[in-house]
Image: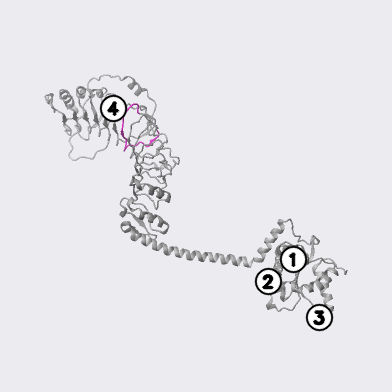
Amino acid sequence: MIELGTFRDFKSLHTLNISSNECLTFRVLSNVSNDVQYTPVRILDVSRLHCTFGPSTVIHKDDIKHLYYTNITHLYLGSNRLSVLETGAARELPRTLKFLSVADNDLSFGLYYIELMSGMPNIEIIHAEHQGSPHNLESGSSDCNDWRAPPSSHNQITFGQSTSELHSCNRNPIRKLGHNSNILTNFPFPHSLREFYYSNNAMNFEIGFVDAQKNNIRILDLSNNLFHSLRGPLVNLKRVQYIDFSNNYCTYVSEYFFSLDNVIKTLLIQNNLLGLVLYKDTSGNIFRNLTKLEMLDLSSNHIYNLPPLLLKNQYKMRILNLSNNALNEFSLDLSHMKHLQYLDLTHNQLKTIKPDQRDQIDKLRGNNVTLNLEGNRMTCSCDQLDYLKWLDHNKGLFVNFHTYECEFPNGTRISFSNFDQTLTEVTKSCDSYIGIIAVFGSMIVLSISLTISGIVYRYRWKLRYLFYLARIRRGGYTPVVSAVDDDDYEYDAFISYCSGDYLFVLKQVVPNLEDSKGLKLCLHQRDFIPGQEIAQNITNAIHRSRKTVVLLSRKYLDSYWCKYEFNMARMESIYSRGGNTVVLLVFYEDIPSRELPFTMMDLIDNESYIEYPRDDTHGQVVFWDKMAKSISPYPTINV
């Protein structure tokens, strides 16, 4: 117990610390506050006057009513299981108070909050963290039977507009999950307040529209709560330079949360779940107003992908922490961050850094920028050889470079403690690999080329035929193949012969078939169109003729164009005449079968042919009659 008058005569008292005296409890506050009003005390520490476990405590107005007349600047009330202040008690705090700690209590929102904010005109720092926090069991803890009954009477105090606002407010800027309680829209922070610490309080809210009114807050710590959604906007926080929203299980932050009028330099939002929303922000709207930002901590946010423009307006960024995420690709645009000094990408899933980002990092070397890539999934493989060479060239940029590891294709992991040797091994294996690829690639190309060449060679006549057929049809000619339209051909027969046999054609073929039988023949020396390609002339002649007569001789077999005519006629039979016989073979000379091409032997085996009787005059008459009947389906007449 502290008797009344104990400290009254301490005329030089500057600091009074009676903390950690659990047997005292708040019962001594009335005597202490009565005494210190007669002293020059500046610091009063009454923290932990109650033991850890027990019923909640309350500060009555009578406990501290004399503090109003002191010049105390620092007041410590922490670790007292304090749950509430009696209405009007907060008004008794000294007006000179600059520092207040109510940490590690059980305080929640109440009317006393407005009293505190309005009753401390010179307050600069408030510590209100760890409200309702659990404590470890202490062996041998004292009996906490320290409950005090409330005083017999209560002074009724009104607070004008502030109280009215508390009772009538139905707006909801901080909305508890699944709960629609009315909570103040406006937070009347004292004008002089510079630092507000409200961490580790398990506040399970969604932060909506919040108007902080007129204030001078520089530091705002709301970490280790359950602010699961940040919708905002936060307005009138025009001087805040440091905000800590870390460890809140936050899954959402809107593009309006950070208002235009801010000068935030440090933003800590690590250990949340913002990866669920950041990957969608392809236009960079969430952080667009944080143009003064110098440090951003997005570590441990389950981020799999970052849009390139996410931080498009952060020109003054110096420290960027993206560690302990799940990034498998780093494509964030760094080109505008001319002041970047440290980039932390540790413990992600990165195998490489894209060439564009490498170039951007190279341009930042003048800022003495450093990177940390420890704990990523780098691979010592050929497809990453350029990246590994870039790492080797820029070793000085990386923090703890010797601790990095990469994995070879066979699963072996190796550290970068001897990176030069590692890079040499990878380079050698890649050179051999490239050689093998080149050999196999060449073999594949050669095989494909040979295959294509073989196909082209095998079907060369078909391809040529189809090519010229297409040209003919493009010119408007369509061959007639039916027997009904058999008289639509321009020629009865196209005579295919070599130039060395021209006299035979001129003196025997033309008189016996054209002059005597009335057939119309096509001869290349007479009927081909001047100026037209030979191949085109040949294809046209075959198309326009009912039959193609081949005068087979050794000279014929030696002629390229004669063989061309034969093969085009054969293609005509297959693809334009429905398989009907077009080619008539006439052996003008005796040629052994071994000297004949396979294609011609196949035709001889399946088609009829005729031999020209050189020394048999009667046989020649019969020969020309048979030829005429084979060429024309109509009866012939002698002219």
Query: Within the image, what quadrant is residue 246 found in?
Result: top left
Q: Distance of mark 3 from mark 1, alpha carbons?
A: 33 Å
Name the residue that disc number 2 marks.
599
Look at the numbered discs 3 and 4 and tell me whether their residues touch, using CB distance below 8 Å: no
Question: What stretch of residues is rendered in magenta?
Answer: 212-231
Q: Residue 292, which numbered label? A: none
Look at the numbered discs 2 and 3 and tell me whether their residues touch, using CB distance below 8 Å: no
Query: What's the magenta bit mostly, secondary-structure-wise?
Result: loop
Q: Nearer the viewer, mark 3 or mark 1?
A: 3
Q: Distance of mark 2 from mark 1, alpha carbons?
A: 17 Å
Chain-order first, disc 2 or disc 1: 1
Chain-order first, disc 2 or disc 3: 2
Horizontal side of 20 relative to 359 (left or right) equals left
Q: Position of residue 595 (x, y in %)?
A: 68, 77
Name the residue that disc number 3 marks.
615
Chain-order first, disc 4 or disc 2: 4
In what element is the residue under mark 1? loop
Query: Within the image, what quadrant is residue 600 found in?
Result: bottom right
Q: Residue at x 83, y 78 (%)?
A: 619
Tag 1: amino acid: Asn
In what element is the residue under mark 3? loop
Name the residue that disc number 1 marks.
580
Nearer to the camera, 267 or 45: 267
Q: Position of residue 46 (x, y in %)?
A: 19, 30
Q: Position of residue 285 (x, y in %)?
A: 43, 37
Name the residue that disc number 4 marks.
192
